[in-house]
Image (cartoon, rainbow, N blue to C red):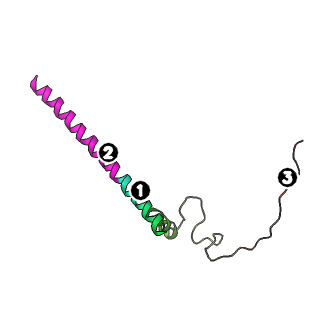
Amino acid sequence: MISKILRFFFRLLFGIFAAVFAVSLLVAALIVVALSLLKSLVTGRKPAPAMVFGRFQRYSPQGMWPGGPAQGDPASSRPGDVVDVEVREVRDDKRLP
């Protein structure tokens, strides 16, 4: 009888410790993200996660997203390319009365 009570007490105690540990990790992660965003706002640089994904996209052979243009694809535009287009207005002539 006493062993069942002690077992229940220890399970409850370890459960509380695990919950406090998990919540403290979440709070620490939120603080790190908030400080990182604040630093990026003050310095004017991109946040570190955005830079990591940008590097992944730049060096990935098939691009960041499946189905998107590949890096070696001539149809994909590079940052230095200039595309000259003619501007024209598109009108909707088939408007319903």
Instruction: Label 2, secondary structure: give it.
Output: helix
Residue 80 sits in which quadrant?
bottom right
Which residue is at a point 57% across and 70% down the rendered structure image?
71
Q: Which residue is mark 3?
A: 92
User: In the rendered structure, which segment of residues is drawn in magenta?
Assistant: 1-28
Is disc 2 surrounded by few (<14), some (14 to 19) or many (20+) residues within 10 Å? few
Q: Nearer the viewer, residue 70 or 51?
A: 51
Looking at the rendered image, the disc whose residue lies closer to the viewer, 2 or 1, is 1
Residue 35 sits in which quadrant?
bottom left
- x then y, percent, for residue 40: 45, 65
Query: Real-space Cα distance between discs 3 and 1?
Result: 47 Å
Q: Which residue is mark 1?
A: 34
Residue 61 counted in the magenta span: no
- x then y, percent, for residue 48: 43, 65
Q: Which mark is residue 23?
A: 2
In the rendered image, the quadrant that contains the N terminus is top left
Tag 1: amino acid: Ala
Circles 2 and 1: CB distance less than 8 Å?
Answer: no
Circles 2 and 3: CB distance less than 8 Å?
Answer: no
